[in-house]
Image (cartoon, grey):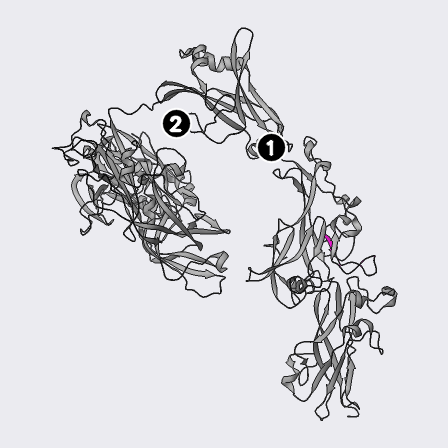
Amino acid sequence: MKKKFYGALLLGSVLLTGGMVSCSDYDDDINSLNDRVAAVEETVKGLQEKINAGCVITSVDPTENGVKVTLSNGESFELLNGAPGAAATVEIGENGNWFINGKDTGKPSRGEKGEQGEPGDSGTAATGKYYKPGENGYWIEVTVGADGKETETETTISWTPEGTMTAVWDSENGKLLVSNVKGYNGILSISLTSELKSLVFQPEFYYQGIEAMEAKTFNYTEKGVKEVNADDDFTTDAPTELDGVAMTPGLVAKYHMNPSSANWKDIKSLSYISDDKNYTRAGGVVKANVFDWEGEEGILTVHSQLTDGTIKDIQNDGKVTVLALQANYSGSEKDTIITSDYAAVKATNYKDMVLANAALGQPVHTMHLYTNAQDAINNAASHEIVWNHEGLDVATLVQTHYDDSQNSHVAWDVTAADKTVEDYGFKYSFELVGYHKGNNRTSESAHAVMKGSLLKPCMPVDGKQPTWDAAEQNKAEKDREPLVRVILTDTVSNKIAAVGYVKFKIVEKATPTESEVILTPEFGFNYEYTVNCTETEKPLQIEWHDFEEDILAQLEKQGISKEDFHTNFELDGGNDDATQYDGKLATSMSTSKKGIVKQTITDTGAEETQIITWTLKNNEAYQLFKNNKSISVIVRYSKEIEPNVYQFVYVTLTWTPNPRNVQPAGTLENSDKIKNYWYAYNSATPGSGYSDIHANVETVGETNADDEFKSNILNTFDGNNVTVSGVNAVYTAFQDANLTKTFTFVDPQSTDMTPVKGNSGTMYDITVGDNGTTLYANVVNNPLVKQAVVKINGSILEYQGKDNETLYSFARDILNAADHAQFVANNEGKKTFTAQIQINAENCSYVPFELENNEFFAKFLRPITISDPHETNFVDATTGGAKADLKLTFVDWRDHNFDNASVTKGQNYYKYYDVESIAQNGDIMTDLNGTTGVFDRKLSDVTGKVKFTFTAPTKSEIQNGNGIVNHYFGTLNYENNGTTVGDFQIKVPFDVTYDWGTIQVYVICKISQTEAN
């Protein structure tokens, strides 16, 4: 009998000492435990406080004076026996019944709810029943109705033997019950559970990185069935196809309770908080209404029904539905509300449910049950049952398959007996289907009875099926073939989802299946392994003398001669490529192969002996060794001693390489970089460090230069090539000359490199795509529209957007956000666009090569910067009207002034950068009637009489001048309202467009007071 401590056992009397407050105080408690004797009430109080603090009892071991109780923190104390008689033990046996002093009481320790009644009945006639120890010293009989409700009745049968101290740990109800305690009258009851403090969601899977639960929708065609019995002829019985059904039974979610010993039965109610995150389209928030929950081993399982709203989908909606569980918990002092973390809900669809055999071990599509009685009758029986079987559980032989959300046809449950489908609103039912074979007037199925899912052969009575209790068995039942109809019912919709038929054959004795394993020799190898990116093979061979000593000689001891082995034992799968197995049991199954195991024959001169050779290709061995210190294969020799009964010899081959070289690595030395091209992080000083490089457009005046933004990373490395050093000499395939180097972007997510602010003020999220070679931007909260910003083509960095505003508006906006030297964000949060780049080295793609010092930053310098020289000024009441040519200062990424002949050297920078337009765009702000220099009001709001208009230049005037000036930027015209005015200023926004986008510049103009006033 297997004793389950967690279900039952305590011995001895409770005579504890010391006040116990919490686990952390336990050392002090233990030191004083043997120094004084405390009253029972104080002892119980201390123990209860310790349990409430989260401690649990992990083991109870008998001692001379009682028992030693060990707590979850590893400390222990002793319970002393104070009863006059011997101590009694109460425990749960292997059959689930309560045992007292090793004797089965016949009382089950837990029960299932009763079977559902027939339609029209209350459904409570059939019940389950179990027992628990009561606090008055008597067994409590618990009756479980078909609806799951429990009714308790106290019996007159005592669970405590008279004159003994008896203790039982009732884990089902969280009670430690102790009788005959010295100093205490009655049954001492101690709660073994603590108060719930928090709930943590246990994810089924991760939905785009979010902990998630699954909301399953089952799609099926409803089936109609006729009533059948075991006696009449239903040879043609088959379900009819009705309407399609889509059923979403709700959610099944699991939560870790903290502490794990918390009493889940103190939860008064559960509810969900639901929300939809990051979603802007219409549609109600889905609601989840909890209808049931249960706890076991620290896990709270919650069942809820979905109502209202719709479950959002990240890909289609840009939003995810999330739920947080709220528990109304009845604590010792007051009720509290405990809220779990949020978890995502993912809606999935399942379809094409079909019933299948669970015991045949065949590919999933070949296991389906027959879908009509005729086919099952016409074909061989799927299972055998011996004539005197007391009840075969058909539920253990059946399962359901369906097409999952990836359209893979898979098994839903292991067997119907595990009740997996019940969590989702389905149930199985089983019934015998009568039919007649040949001239027999008695139905084949009348030779069996069913009780629930149990099938038992029997003899008919007067040609009819008897009842279960009246059924008698006889060998004459042999060769009869009862037919069982299996139905899968959707209990939420009360519709039938699938129907299948299983035929059984009653036999005198089962076809022998008791194969045996007679020898399991093991052979080890420790040859070195070094990954080398090749298909080279490593043969590992069992030498003939090892085969002789460890296999043949050992079989001789069992009476199996060498000749018998050679003649009758065969290598499964054949001598050229043996089958490999997942274990060394008679029931072990074939598994995926690791290399090839062959058998050859060696001739020693006097005799021949088998030799086993295991061959692995280098790349396959790497996949096995990269995470494992050793690998093994198991092959099998088989001898059939009678039909379907075998003797097996399993041979295990294990390779434990010494050394195991599977992690090639190297480094990039800074000495391989050309110092003058490199900068410290965010530094503008060349040679200050090796963190940054600066990427820029082509230089004006160079051969064929046309302002393209392409920078070759290799230009910054010595010899214009990346050199990997520091590779261990053992890795010959990964020395520098054998490595291919590539450049990819590092994902900027969770760094300060995203989001970034564009020139327009728009925020962009930066992501990586195209196998790491493209940086994309999307407007924050709008991930469905993204544009390329910069690409890596080989070693060339190519910024996107020259002369193409349509496809690369995001890239242009980001590039023009900040001056080329603005490496740290300014007061507007704008800075030079920066990307992190990684250098990768590899020989073969499946072997990761660890490369140190291989990451750096590239800053993409804005091609030009435009500023206000503060030279656009007016005097009020000027004769002929006040006009002023717009003054702007243009410099490029090298701080070259476009109008400084000493640096332009005859080149027209305006034309090279294709400065094509200057437009006044936006509100003119002013300090008129305010604080000087504070431009906080629109000019139009202050007065409608003072006006400024702008005469824009043509592209030719910008680039080539208009005869008066070399480069003309337009003219501002000022009009007063006829009243003299004092000094004031205006701030005018202008958009300057060039081949890499638009830059906004603000020009501050001073208007001097009216002349002579």
User: Within 10 angstroms of label 1, few (less than 14), some, or many (20 or more) residues?
Assistant: some
Residue sitting at the far front: 439
Pick the quarter of the image with the N terminus: top left
Relative to 47, does residue 312 appear above or below in the rendering?
below
Question: Is residue 714 something that shows in the picture?
Answer: yes
Instruction: Identify residue for label 1.
Output: 619
Relative to 948, does residue 299 appear above or below in the rendering?
above
Q: Percent position (x, y) of residue 734?
A: 68, 35
What's the residue type where badge 1 is placed?
Answer: Asn
In the rendered view, does 351 fall on the left or right side of 1013?
left
Element marked by disc 1 = helix
Classify residue 371 by image quadrant: top left
Pick the quarter of the image with the C terminus: bottom right
What residue do we see at 29% from left, 53% from top? Answer: 493
Question: Is residue 160 something that shows in the picture?
Answer: no
Magenta stretch contains residue 703: yes
Residue toward you, 382 or 512: 382
Residue 587's tag is: 2
Element marked by disc 2 = loop
Relative to 212, does residue 988 appear above or below in the rendering?
below
Q: Main secondary structure of the magenta part?
A: loop
Magenta stretch contains residue 55: no
In the rendered view, does 874 fall on the left or right side of 661?
right
What's the residue type where badge 2 is placed?
Answer: Thr
| Magenta highlight range | 684-704
Residue toward you, 717 or 59: 717
Residue toward you, 463 or 882: 463
